[in-house]
Amino acid sequence: MEDPEPVFGREGDLVRLSCQAQGHPLPHITWSLHDVTPEDSGAEGHVNSTVWVQMTPELANDGVRCHAHNRYGEAETSFSLRIRKITFVPTVPTTHPTGGPLAGPGAAVVAVVVCVLVLLLVVGCFYGLQRRRHLPCRGGGEKRSLTPRAGGVTAPGGATELRPDGTEQSRGLLSPGGGPGPEC
């Protein structure tokens, strides 16, 4: 009798254990399990016995033994049963159960690109409408002069500076919001 390889399975699985022996007269094989019926076959001095067992922690702990004997001798071998732990590996299906494509990392990139393009299109439309004067300018649509008014009045939000040659220069031409002011 040869020592078998360890038998692996998940708890609750049915596993097949086979034991072979040879001798003359033909050996009789018994198992350490009492609640199973072996399937025996033999020919020309060889006997094979097979049992199906359910993987349990008790069997994995105790093991299963196969005992062959005839009137001239006996032999025994043990099966080492090992329960594999069930591990779940999350997988992302590539299609929806209805057969259509499922959103994945590539779809997220496409969605972001489409959103950016739509935003650029909207901004471009507003810019074009404003340039064609279909949209009113900020500040109610009136244009303000950026040069000092007669009588020493400065432009709104600005200051007048005297140049060395005696002419006035207006400073602070930007609006408080940081943009170019209400002009279009």
Image (tube, rainbow, N blue to C red):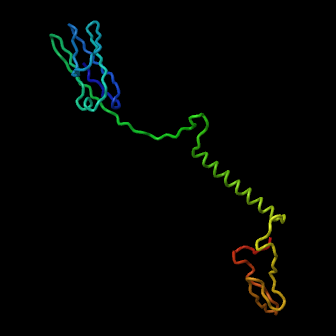
Q: Position of residue 51 (x, y in %)?
A: 29, 19
The quadrant in which the N terminus is found is top left
Q: Position of residue 177 (x, y in %)?
A: 69, 75
State whether residue 71 is above or below residue 82: above
Say which residue appears at 19% left-offset and 18% top-offset. 75
Say which residue appears at 76% left-offset and 74% top-offset. 139
User: Residue 125 lies in what quarter of the image?
Assistant: bottom right
The quadrant in which the C terminus is found is bottom right
State whether residue 83 is above or below residue 129: above
State whether residue 150 is above or below residue 133: below
User: Residue 52 lies in what quarter of the image?
Assistant: top left
User: Residue 142 lies in what quarter of the image?
Assistant: bottom right
State whether residue 28 is above or below residue 110: above
Say which residue appears at 29% left-offset and 10% top-offset. 41
Q: Position of residue 122 (x, y in %)?
A: 74, 57
Q: Nearer the viewer, residue 38 or 156?
A: 156
Q: Position of residue 109 (x, y in %)?
A: 62, 49
Instruction: Please state the total of marks drawn on the protein image.
Output: 0
Q: Nearer the viewer, residue 165 or 138?
A: 138
| View extreme (front): residue | 140
